[in-house]
Amino acid sequence: MKTKKIIFNKLIEITILFFIILTVLFFLFRAAPGDPVSRMVDPTLTPEDIQLLIAQMGLDEPAWKQYIIYIKNFFSGNLGHSFHYGEPVSNIILDRMPCTILLFTTSTLLAAFAGVFLGKIAAWKKGSAIDNVLSIGALLCHTLFIPWFALLVLWAFAYKLGWFPLGGIISPELWINDTSFFIKMLDVLHHMFLPLLTLFFIHLGSYLLLMRSSMLGVLKEEYIITARAKGLSDKVIRNKHAARNAALPVITSVGLSLAFSINGGALTEQIFTWPGIGRELIFAVSNNDYPLAQACFLLITAVVLIANLIVDLLYAYMDPRISY
Amino acid sequence: MALLKVENLSVGYKSKKGMVNAVNNISFSIEQGRSLGFVGESGCGKTTIGMTLMGLLPENASILKGDIIFNGNNLASFNDEKWRAFRGKEISMIFQAAMNALNPVIRVDEQIAEVIQIHNPAMSKSDVSNQVKKIFSLVEIPEDRLRDFPHQYSGGMKQRAIIAMALACAPKLIIADEPTTALDVIVQDQILKEIKKIQKALNTSVIFISHDIAVVADVCKDICVMYGGHIVEKGTREEVFKSPRHPYTKTLLGSYLTLDSYEDINVPEIREAPDLITMTGGCRFSANCNCKSQKCQCQTPEWVNLSSTHQALCFEELLNKDKND
Amino acid sequence: MKKIEKKPEHRNHYIERFTKSWAIFIKNPMGKTGLIILSAFMLMAIASFFVPLLGPVYHPMTGADPNITYSTGPSLQHWLGTDFIGRDLFVQLLEGAKVAFIVGLSCAFISVVLGTAIGMISGYAGGIVDTILMRIADIFMVLPSLVILLILASLWELSIWVIIFIIAIMRWPSVSRIIRSQTLSLKSRPFIEASRVAGASNFRIIFKHIMPNVLPLAFLYMTFRVTSAILVEAALSFLGFGDPGQVSWGMMLQWVWSSGHMFQAPYWLLPPGICISLLTLSFYMLGRAMDEVLDPRLRKEEEEE
């Protein structure tokens, strides 16, 4: 019952938020210098096609009507036509979406689990050699400049050692020939390894540092002394009594750092030519493909909002004290 | 034979300025089924005694000398492994509920079940849960609140749950460190009754640590008054509270407001805290004592027997001098 | 009369507090390392003002060496080598340090001023004002700044100052949240209550009593904001949407990448990346050390050990 209500409230909240962003974007695209029509409709099309699209998007109507049509179009999945690809934008982003989700969730989850695990150990052995190595390593990861680190990874593992492909998500020859699903999967994993590695290390640092300091705080709590007074073993105290409490702020931070992760994700996709939304956005912006850029932006925002919702729910599930 | 016998125990904390002698050369003993109270102001070392008996001293603290004989074992020589098997089973501790002593993200029954499980690995799950239910009924928590999280409990219920946790393995000795300090008076009274009842029912020994004289007087038959890491006076509660002899005990009792004495209450003036680092050998209370003599500063006071059960750490002539006043 | 007497005492108090904090700060190995690295970068930034005086060849943007038409490795004449049209990489690196400082510090300054003001108002006013301001903060918090900058870059050509301003706008909410909770706890302290009873205006209470108490915290957050601002600006430049008239480390990486030199010219690829990472690291270390100075709980623990 409680959970249902939380989900419902949160859903309303993010819907309103999304609406605001949608509206701001609408005005931004009309406030920018130049002809808004030429931004919405590919100028290289035939005059008849241009007229058709203008009518469809209501670009000859007054602003408030345009806005209504814009919202209507958005919710019916009509996001305009890409200049570059010459197809509906929705087709393109639906095609890119899975790649981004795959890379993004895998790297975030792996990094969060590893960060929590290593942060726990570092805090438990505070001041030891392990702690120092982990803390300094995490600090370096945390302050690395993402594209540069990605280029180094690419240079070392793909160019020098040649263990992994330089980019992309698949090797075309495998997909033209009829190979088994398993081999195709392996091929995708092979391509995914380097971008995954990059994102993993970049996220790992902040999660580890956060878990470490959170765990150090928890270890000073009274209930840890209680646990010791019960005669519990160190392992049980560390994993059951301390780590669960200490991981809570890390979950919140996963939510708060999603925006940061998206930035990193876009850069990583760009360098490893991973065909995701982030790379598509950068491409669209570079080529003045406005409808595509707008759609990518909205989609990324939607992903961030939904991911935030999931994180909030996870937190509510993990911390019994939360009741919205 | 006494259940617990502490002899010449000294505990020190390492600090930048030197070794802090939080507990200095104290001896006491407690029989099976008896209750012993420690009173004193904060910083007098009473909590350190509790932590020492549980083997829970922080890393910068250590036992400097002395023996702790519990049931024939010397706890002072225990290693981590031995302590782990011992804690919670033979001696357990009642913590202050207000201090977040219950883990907020684990259900209360689970927090109690795990004590039983760790000390009785052979016990089946259903036996453990039956045992938990039994203990809960003992401390009078309704059974339908078993699966709650700590934050759903009131302050008094949390304290009951903590008592239940301490009782889980039927220990021979329970150390209660300020168990009622943050509770309101009515709840405090209930909890104290609970502790007395349980102690009688299980014939457990209780060491009760508090700064609140009324609470200690309510629960304990024997009293130790502590000051600056020393026990300065010990005896039965009647002896210590009705006819206090040590100057510090008198000051402590003088600061306590009772209805019949409110007119001529003498609230002690702000005093110097005792120096626990430099060991002058003199009486630690001498700086604040109002009946001191020259030798208090440099000579170590000795135990003066006042009756077969009543003793004070002072100089005999001073105790007598004060009596004549 | 009374006021005049009081003032020097106040000043002494602040100086004393500062010297005490400084003593703790400088003892901290993290703070010391951070400060040393930071000083090195400051020297680089200062040097960048003088290098172009050596001659037009040493201009970071336009100063191509006429004898060189391809990227060369380190030499006596060009310490770090040149890029693909013969511009000196070391000069560009110095110029990048200057830009990074400008971007980082001004961004952090704007966002911290904004965040502190909003946080104080929100915490002090409470009620509906608080709710609205914090909802707005939430919105900004979930938006990915680089993506926003990209979409804006598609519509406008962004100059360096516009970029700085947008990053600052994106970055105030987390500062606000911290300052707000600090204000909330200050608000309930007796001395605020006392001055309200004494008839002080809200304005006076905020500026006289709350602000001095939240400023150290705001300053701490400034160091963390600096790092994120530098990283975002560098990322934007790297993607090719930075200020086209301004050489920066991100742009150097953009050039090495887009001109296809990334696998051939490590002398070109490595320095800008190392600089960005080291500079953000030093600011981060500085912040952590300051955190320890400001948090007496942490400090005490250090003393005990």
Image: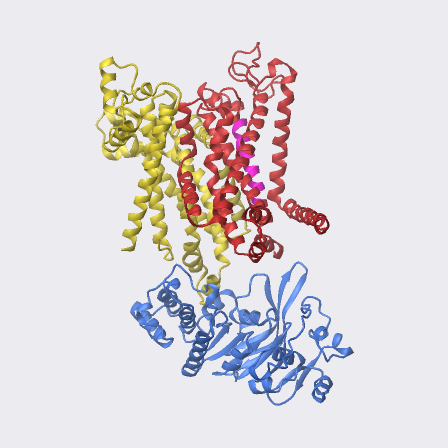
Chain colours: A yellow, B blue, C red
At x 42% / y 51%, what residue is drawn?
A: A247
Q: Is residue C272 magenta?
A: yes
Image position of A115 with respect to C246: above or below: below
Which residue is farthest front?
C199
Front-most of C113 and A115?
C113
Front-most of C186 and A251?
C186
Q: Position of residue C46 (x, y in %)?
A: 64, 27
Side of C248 where B13 appears, left or right: right
At x 33% / y 49%, what residue is drawn?
A: A313
Image position of C194 with respect to C123: above or below: below
Q: Position of residue B141 (x, y in %)?
A: 35, 72
Image position of C238 with respect to A227: above or below: above
Quadrant assignment, res C94:
top right
Which residue is farthest right?
B294
Front-most of A223 and A259?
A259
Front-most of A131 and C283?
C283
Predominant SS along the magenta part = helix
Side of B34 where C304 appears, left or right: right
In magenta, the rendered stretch is C271-289
Visible residue check, residue C151 = yes
In the rendered image, the quadrant that contains the N terminus of chain A is: bottom left
Quadrant assignment, res C283:
top right
Q: How many marks?
A: 0
Visible residue check, residue A274 = no
Q: Position of residue C231 (x, y in %)?
A: 49, 32
Q: Is residue C284 magenta?
A: yes
